[in-house]
Image: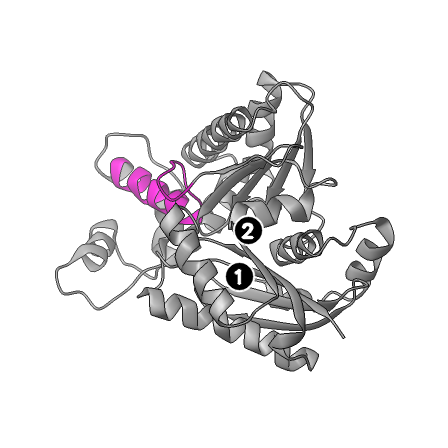
Amino acid sequence: MSYLLGVDGGNSKTVALVADLEGRILGSGRSGCSDIYGAPSEEAALAELDRAVEQALISAGVEAGSLVAGVFSLAGADWPEDFELLESHVRSRGYGQQVKVYNDAIGALRAGSPDGTGVSVVCGTGMAIGARSPEGKIWHTSFWQEPQGAQELGHKALRAVMRAELGIDPPTKLRERLLAHFAAESVEGFLHALTARGSRRRYNLGSFARVLLDTAVEGDPTALRIVLEHGRAIGDYALAAARQVGIQDDPFYLVLAGGVIRHPSKLVAQAIIDRVLASDPDVRPVFSRFEPAVGALLLAYELAGIPTNDELLARIACSLPPASLFET
């Protein structure tokens, strides 16, 4: 028997899926951060990658030697030397007779675009934007882009609270929400705990992004400004990605994915869409049907020369693991 492997790796989690050639997902695995820039070390990132794959193989009852193709859609696959490192590792582990590494934006694009082309925007803990033309030209951003994802939204909210506290900007509901979220008694006390030399406390400012979005929905002017400006800036990068692969004049798919995008308010998503449609009214926005790991799996089918027709997609949809596997 022959099987396929698809892996989506990021800062928050790594998810691996093993499927048969007909589209039935047989096993899955999950581990931590496999981003070679975000993990404590390259070795730690690769160990997490291996852990997710090995879990998936064990749960599927499959040996690595039975994998005909493996595709890895990974945060941290940014520069040529990154691809060299990652592809060398997965080849050495025998994760497919054919293996291919992509930036995580490309797996997300394949998960949401009906034909695998267009532009993807993945706004989660971090940010990934990628594009793929019908001719196969690929481009993606990296951690150097601004804006980023939830982490940056959290930082922006904190800066807004600090400016309001100093009287530079008007008061905002974000102040009380920030103090409650992080169980702090004062803004100054929180800043002290956050930045003090030798402090052992670690705060995940990205966790405040959801509170920021909730506050924006309530109409707080400061929160709303931060969110809408963030979305418009992301939209500018999406348009730039389309230009990089030469599809800016085509009615391309704009795939939207990630935890920030999935927030019930859809404020960030709509700001991105509005920015892109203002430049190109023929763009077709879509919210991803599948999780990025499924996109990596679909790329594995492509690599193996297996058509991803409606019947195969239906079998994948019917055999998806529980949603909890993909939650951040």
Question: At 64% from the left edge and 55% from the top edge, which residue is drawn?
Answer: 291
Residue 328 sits above or below residue 137 on the image = below
Q: Amino acid at mark 1?
A: Thr
Q: Nearer the viewer, residue 114 or 196?
A: 114
- Residue interval drawn in magenta: 142-163
Q: Is residue 1 left or right of residue 55?
A: right
Q: Is residue 47 left or right of residue 279?
A: left
Q: Report the residue marked by disc 2.
A: 259
Regarding residue 280, the answer to whether it shows in the image is: yes
> Helix or strand or loop: what does disc 2 sit on?
loop
Q: Report the residue marked by disc 1.
A: 328
Q: Amino acid at mark 2?
A: Gly
Mark 2 near mark 1, Cβ–Cβ under 8 Å?
A: yes
Q: Is residue 201 magenta?
A: no
Dominant secondary structure of the residues highlighted in magenta in the image: helix
The image quadrant that residue 318 belongs to is: bottom right
Q: Position of residue 157 (x, y in %)?
A: 36, 42
Q: Nearer the viewer, residue 25 or 255?
A: 25
